[in-house]
């Protein structure tokens, strides 16, 4: 379904969606982030990109998995804490982040299904916004199989056409969302469709960063596994972890028990985002660490994204959003690292 | 739909002190509080919970042929295993799983099986040893080569004495001890001393990484091919189901694709374990 929505009617559409929780990019101080929006009429879809990707809505930075309670060592009560079934819509997702959510879905639903993720994902409708101009000078989606107007992972793709949005449903859920307020939408005329195509093609050309021969790099990575390359590239890393926290597909997590009261025992088992760049991420209780230095940890991050995941799922675990480049305080640039891999000679 | 993160409650029915001191080992037998389906394969592991402390992945050391309890032999090492060591019979823990691939023992029928263990490394092997002994007619000769630093550090001491009546067992300690009549030296040296034959044989080894490395070298020297040698790999784990991202070696998640590997496969993976 392809429709036109006047920008003046955008907030009317949102108001019609009052049975959903609505998430959208909200500006707070200098940064934009996805937040639950109380007054949907305040949503403005005019923003660069959020500091943290929308993964945080489906895979929160901290979430309770279960609660436990016990009056003695012999009696323990467990209570499963499963996310509530609240239909939600996330508005304004960039194509890179949407494809990131599609990759996360493969990870969390594949094999053993992760109910916490899938309960949220199954009741969330994803409405994307094409990037007419790159939201970041560091983004490189076209190098990793994406595009600024990719529909991968989305239910609806919107494109800003000046005074109106071109609204295209991708899935049945998306179609229903449009139909629920169909009176607000118009059919697109032929010349508008041509204009859309032009905007999309132009947007691709505006992307500044590019990785040459990504397939070749992907298969070359194992060859340079045991080289000094990684020592040099990781030298400046200060282990802050922003590269993975801000990544739309990084999904490593920790599970810990938080005790509220020791007697009688009461507490929660909590899952939090974790980070492969931290030394204790892989450290055994004996003190032995299979990835003991910055070199082996940067190598893990790059290998996971561009080789291991490719081997397991036939795609890259990177969407080209560029956040890890923009946010790195010491200038570790994944595009540059991969270019160095490409030209590296042992 | 099953929520993989919720453990089943189980009661500790017995605790046996195997080794005391700095590197204490205890063997726990547990029974589920409610009737649960926990069918597993030799070499698979379970995520044990001490509520309020956390979880730890431990291999099941009892045989899948035993239905009325699960057995775990645990080295006191981190927060959770230390808490387990402080528990008493009757206390309740959480168990989820089973996880991992397990040993392909169906493929080993009609073969000679050689088990080579060091220290706590006998625990994951114990599950197959018990299974193979119970179904002795399905396998040819069974041999166990097992050692530890000192005779005090050997696990399953009484059980080993009993087992000697049913299969060949060669024990060792690293250094000379009064009254020690068996081999003195490292486990790989004992392997070279006993010279098991590679014909129609599978060797399974488990123990400290450095021991495994030299056992594999010894087996190769004795003519064992890489696909005749099996071992298990350990890494830190949190989820146990291939999601949390820390136990991987290359594209393999040990919790899911491992922990059992033939040396032919393991030698092709990065040595990040």
Image (cartoon, rainbow, N blue to C red):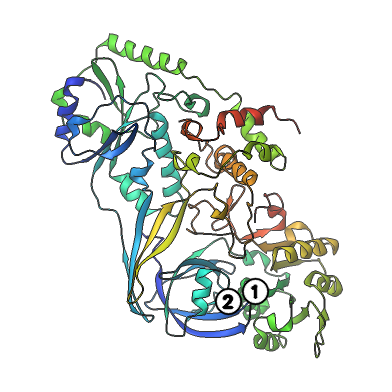
Query: Residue drawn 24% across and 12% down?
Result: A189
Instruction: Compare marks 2 and 1 and give the one earlier in the sequence.
Output: 2
Name the element at disc 1: helix
List the residue tagged with mark 1.
Answer: B120
Query: In the image, are marks 2 and 1 on the same chain?
Result: yes
Q: Chain of mark 2?
A: B
Residue A173 vs residue A208: left or right?
A: left
The quadrant in which the N terminus of chain A is found is top left
x%, y% of residue A266?
Answer: 33, 70
Tell me the number on the disc at residue B73.
Answer: 2
Q: Quadrant of residue A288?
A: bottom right
- Residue A222 appears in the figure: no
Q: Residue furthest top?
A: A191
Q: Nearer the viewer, residue A109 or A7?
A: A7
Q: Is residue B9 left or right of residue B144?
A: left
Q: Residue at x 34, y 45 (%)?
A: A58
Give the left or right position of residue B210, taking residue A10 as reference: right
CA neighbours of label 1 inside 10 A, class few (<14), some (14 to 19), many (20+):
many
- Residue B196: horizontal and vertical position, in percent? 82, 71
Q: Does residue B9 lie above or below A193 as drawn?
A: below
CB under 8 Å between discs 2 and 1? yes
Q: Compare residues B59 and B17 and report the one nearer the observer.
A: B17
Percent x, y of residue A121: 33, 45
């Amino acid at each position: 379904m392809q429709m036109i929505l006047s920008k003046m009617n955008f907030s009317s559409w949102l108001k019609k969606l009052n049975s959903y929780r609505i998430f959208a990019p909200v500006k707070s101080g200098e940064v934009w982030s996805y937040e639950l929006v109380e007054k949907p009429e305040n949503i403005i879809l005019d923003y660069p990109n959020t500091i943290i990707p929308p993964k945080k809505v489906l895979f929160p930075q901290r979430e309770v998995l279960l609660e436990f309670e016990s009056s003695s060592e012999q009696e323990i009560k467990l209570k499963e804490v499963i996310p509530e079934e609240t239909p939600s819509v996330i508005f304004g997702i960039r194509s890179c982040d949407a494809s990131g959510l599609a990759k996360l879905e493969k990870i969390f639903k594949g094999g053993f299904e992760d109910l916490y993720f899938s309960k949220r994902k199954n009741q969330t409708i994803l409405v994307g916004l094409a990037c007419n101009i790159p939201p970041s000078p560091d983004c490189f989606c076209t190098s990793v199989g994406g595009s600024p107007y990719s529909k991968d992972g989305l239910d609806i793709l919107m494109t800003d056409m000046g005074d109106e949005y071109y609204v295209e449903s991708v899935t049945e859920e998306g179609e229903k969302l449009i139909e629920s307020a169909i009176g607000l939408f118009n059919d697109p005329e032929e010349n508008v469709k041509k204009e859309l195509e032009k905007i999309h093609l132009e947007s691709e050309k505006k992307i500044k960063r590019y990785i040459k021969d990504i397939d070749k790099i992907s298969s070359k990575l194992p060859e340079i596994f045991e080289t000094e390359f990684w020592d040099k590239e990781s030298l400046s890393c200060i282990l802050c972890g922003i590269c993975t926290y801000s990544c739309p597909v990084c999904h490593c997590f920790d599970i810990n028990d938080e005790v509220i009261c020791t007697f009688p025992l009461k507490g929660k088992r909590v899952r939090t985002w974790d980070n492969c760049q931290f030394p204790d991420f892989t450290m055994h209780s004996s003190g032995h660490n299979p990835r003991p230095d910055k070199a082996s940890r940067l190598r893990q991050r790059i290998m996971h994204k561009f080789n291991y995941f490719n081997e397991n799922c036939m795609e890259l675990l990177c969407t080209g959003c560029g956040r890890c480049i923009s946010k790195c305080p010491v200038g570790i640039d994944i595009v540059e690292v991969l270019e160095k891999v490409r030209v590296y000679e042992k | 739909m099953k929520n993989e993160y919720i453990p089943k409650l189980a009661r500790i029915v017995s605790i046996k002190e195997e080794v005391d001191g700095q590197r204490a080992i205890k063997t726990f037998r547990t029974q589920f509080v409610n009737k649960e389906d926990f069918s597993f394969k030799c070499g698979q592991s379970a995520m044990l919970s001490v509520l309020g402390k956390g979880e730890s992945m431990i291999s099941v050391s009892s045989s899948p042929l035993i239905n009325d309890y699960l057995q775990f032999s645990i080295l006191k090492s981190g927060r959770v295993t230390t808490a387990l060591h402080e528990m008493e019979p009757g206390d309740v823990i959480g168990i989820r799983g089973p996880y991992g691939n397990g040993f392909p023992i169906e493929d080993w029928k009609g073969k000679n099986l050689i088990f080579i263990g060091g220290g706590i490394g006998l625990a994951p092997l114990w599950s197959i040893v018990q299974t193979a002994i119970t179904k002795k007619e399905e396998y040819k000769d069974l041999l166990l080569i097992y050692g530890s630093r000192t005779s005090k550090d050997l696990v399953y001491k009484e059980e080993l004495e009993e087992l000697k009546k049913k299969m060949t067992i060669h024990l060792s300690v690293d250094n000379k001890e009064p009254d020690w009549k068996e081999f003195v030296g490292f486990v790989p040296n004992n392997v070279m001393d006993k010279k098991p034959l590679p014909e129609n044989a599978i060797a399974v080894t488990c123990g400290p990484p450095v021991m495994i490395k030299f056992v594999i070298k010894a087996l190769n020297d004795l003519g064992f091919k890489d696909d005749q040698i099996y071992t298990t790999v350990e890494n830190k784990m949190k989820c146990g189901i291939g999601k949390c991202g820390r136990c991987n070696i290359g594209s393999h998640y040990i919790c899911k694709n491992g922990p059992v590997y033939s040396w032919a496969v393991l030698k092709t993976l990065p040595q990040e374990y």
